[in-house]
Amino acid sequence: MRLGPRPAALGLLLLLCAPAAGAGDAQGEHRSDYDREALLGGQEEVDEYVKLAPEEQQKRLKSIVKKIDLDSDGFLTESELSSWIQMSFKHYAMQEAKQQFVEYDKNSDGSVSWDEYNIQMYDRVIDFDENTALDDAEEESFRQLHLKDKKRFEKANQDSDPGLNLEEFIAFEHPEEVDYMTEFVIEEALEEHDKDGDGFVSLEEFLGDYRRDPAANEDPEWILVEKDRFLNDYDKDSDGRLDPQELLSWVVPNNQGIAQEEALHLIDEMDLNNDRKLSEAEILENQDLFLTSEATDYGRQLHDEYFHRDEL
């Protein structure tokens, strides 16, 4: 179930925002050539990027900047940048789901059945008994995951058709993007983590099976990090447990937070006159940085007409 932040996007964001060994010279100077390969995704994407003539790069970039500027005042604010990045996240998630839909719809009838999903995923139709656990631990773990997929499939289906249409398939693949799946996401998270059944997730339940080694004087570093996340990021009312809404902020990708962090980073790096907003001139002055950021999906938007054509 896709309930965590996009690993690639988050990893690339952290790479952009933090200095990395070998990413610059001895003084930590920003190296755009390193960023292009690391952030565009590889040499093939870099080659595609450099195929555009400088004039065409600038033309498409100006078109994107114009679209980000929602109030058309000639400046990009943190809010406008953040909104654009979040829209980009959702656009590519939906595009991926649409491509998957075609692959899963084996008979091209405009609907993905549970059998078609199984065939695409496992090359065969799998059917487990919901009430019979398996002796082998690995097989039982797979049975549990498969049953969760089936439950999510059934929840995404909103009509009498046994298969999923495109909208329902998107809800199945990206339940965090669809309002009617929110309750299911919370229920599934509680089922997995709420061991005492009180409707909340305690710190102990949040940490899972971890138990401190009796011989250790303190918790390992990763546990300290997780405790800090629980206390400072998720437990908003500081009552020592996560209620359903707080739980949602843990299990659902926080694209808004990622987008805000990236927007702030761009303003910090590119705002030459310290007015906390970006003009077109400032962006063009720092074109390499802007093209190796989430604001353009690491330059990908220059090759996607959805973003740089005259009208969205």
Image (tube, rainbow, N blue to C red):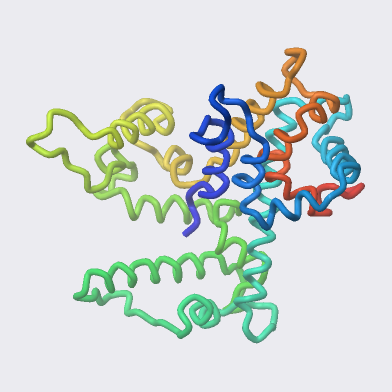
Is 42 on the left-hand or right-hand side of 185?
A: right
Residue placed most toward the observer, 225 or 27 = 27
Q: In the displayed orientation, state which residue is furthest to the front.
A: 26
Residue located at (52% from left, 45% from top)? 253
Quarter occupied by residue 247: top left
- Rendering coords of residue 129 (x, y %): 32, 79
Up-down relation of residue 98 to residue 192 (above or below): below
Question: How many numbered tags mark residues here?
Answer: 0
Is 130 on the left-hand or right-hand side of 35?
A: left
Up-down relation of residue 175 to residue 103 (above or below): above
- Rendering coords of residue 238 (x, y %): 36, 25
Quarter occupied by residue 228: top left
Residue located at (73% from left, 35% from top)? 288
- Rendering coords of residue 267 (x, y %): 69, 24
Is 308 on the left-hand or right-hand side of 93?
A: right
Residue located at (80% from left, 27% from top)? 285
Up-down relation of residue 231 to residue 303 (above or below): above
- Rendering coords of residue 215 (x, y %): 7, 35
Residue located at (64% from left, 55% from top)? 93
Residue placed most toward the observer, 231 or 161 = 231
Q: In the displayed orientation, state which residue is furthest to the top.
A: 274
Up-down relation of residue 106 to residue 139 (above or below): below
